[in-house]
Amino acid sequence: MSILYTTIEKLCAEKGISVTQLCKESGASRASLTDLKKGRKQSLSTETLLKIASYFGVSVDYLLGNTDKKEKAPAEEGGGITDEELKFALFDAPEEITDDIMNEVKRFAKYVEEQRRNGHIK
């Protein structure tokens, strides 16, 4: 089993979800993760890596085992806005916002951006 798959499994365990649930919620292909687990693949497409990294709020480098630091670089966060700045902008009581809430906000933002790119939102 690859380091990549082991890292994904670890992140799923930390979040209390299955790999199947990750795929459903992130849009990643379950077949590609099965191939990775079974050794039929050694890596994932850039698109799939980005979906998984975005879902967990980690960098692609972390998924690939190139760094132990989970946090994304400012450029990966979308123009350098920090989570703290986002919390302040969106919520009345930013100190009460949990990591799970922030992950949902980020997932929703990615969804809206994807819908815009696909022409479903103008």
Image (tube, rainbow, N blue to C red):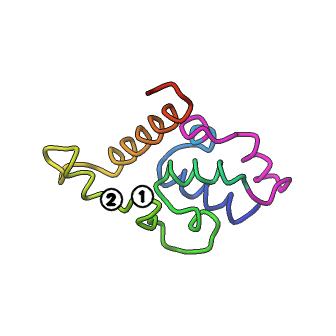
Q: Position of residue 88 (x, y in %)?
A: 19, 52
The magenta region covers 23-43
Label 1 neighbour load within 10 Å: few <14, some 14-19, many 20+: some
Taking the view exactly as shown, the residue that stands out farthest to the top is 120
Q: Which residue is mark 2?
A: 81
Query: Which quarter of the picture shows residue 101?
Result: top left
At x 76%, y 40%, the residue is 31
Q: Nearer the viewer, residue 55 or 121?
A: 121
Q: Secondary structure at mark 1?
A: helix
Kind of residue sitting beneath label 2? Ile
Q: Main secondary structure of the magenta part?
A: helix
Q: Nearer the viewer, residue 51 or 19?
A: 51
Q: Nearer the viewer, residue 113 or 29?
A: 113
Circles 2 and 1, Cβ within 8 Å, touching? The answer is yes
Task: Kindly report the distance in space between the C-alpha atoms of the residues bearing marks 2 and 1.
Answer: 6 Å
Position of 106 with respect to 21 (left or right) is left
Q: Which residue is mark 1?
A: 77
